Image (cartoon, rainbow, N blue to C red):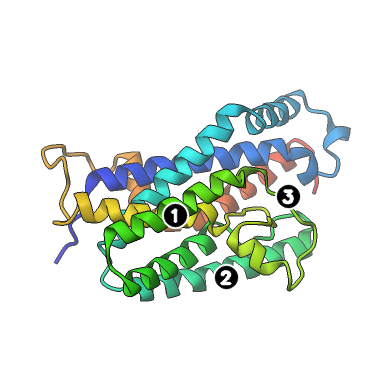
Amino acid sequence: MKKTRIWELDFARGFAIIMMIFDHIMYDLKNLSSYFENFYEVNNSTFEWLKDFGKLYWNSELRFIGHFFFVALFLIVSGISFTFSKSNLNRSNKLMIVAVLISLVTFAIEYFTKVQVFIIFGVIHMYAFSTFLTYLFRKVWNNDIFIFTIGAAILILGFSSEFWQLHYISKITWDSIPGIIIGTKAFGADYFGLVPYLGIIMIGTVIGNLFYKNKVSLYPKVKLSEKNIFIFAGRKSLIIFLTHQFILMGLLVVIGYLFGYRM
């Protein structure tokens, strides 16, 4: 039996994923000079402009606000999807395996290329841990007011501690790992602590129970093609997330080599 999809959730997830890809493109552009060792020797005006544009965006208020908004949108949809899953324990276990593989692959890439891409606790790690913790909290008391209260408290804690201004540590020690997981310390190319993001996912599960109890679209009369870019991205979000940066970096290296740049 074909699984019924809720188009607005696929659309919102896909929109968030596409904006994330744009954000990562800007990250790559601003770091062009660190990717290519002869960047300043080649001195290509177009690449210089792209680097400056990426840096301008990355340090802008637009990126600061937009980044949190689109991450929050993705996690709220993920929280809603939590309420649809038959086994969130299995779901979290599978995500944790993917997270470990991400860490191993990025460590190997950084070790052999010296490009700083190692991810120890990125968005997939956070998502896996958050799914597991939300599962445990709902096992303790499957009450939406209880879950919303905890989620809101975690969110408030994140904002009160100014989670966006975390100090990035340069070296991992066993003592630093709990802080990295919780969200009091930061490390890695892609970092997302449990605070405040666990809170957003927990609130998303409450939204799912309130508005999607019957697991049907709130706008059933709206029909969008499966070829719609946002619908497609929303349905393939995990695959896109796992592969997009490798594709972007590959294209960047190939194009750079054509213009004389070398890593």
Tell me the element at label 1: helix
Up the image or down, 81 lies above or below 43; here it is below
Report how far apart the C-alphas of labels 3 and 2 lie in the structure: 26 Å
Tell me the element at label 2: helix
- How crowded pointer 1 is (Cα within 10 Å; few <14, some 14-19, many 20+) is rated as many
Report how far apart the C-alphas of labels 1 and 2 lie in the structure: 25 Å
Residue 101: image tag: 2
Up the image or down, 119 lies above or below 93; here it is above
Residue 199: image tag: 1
Mark 3 or 2 closer to N-term? 2
The image position of residue 159, as x and y in percent, is 55, 44
Q: How many marks?
A: 3
> Residue 174, located in which quarter of the rendered image?
bottom right
At x 46%, y 63%, the residue is 130
The image position of residue 73, as x and y in percent, is 40, 44
Q: Which residue is mark 3?
A: 167
At x 74%, y 61%, the residue is 110
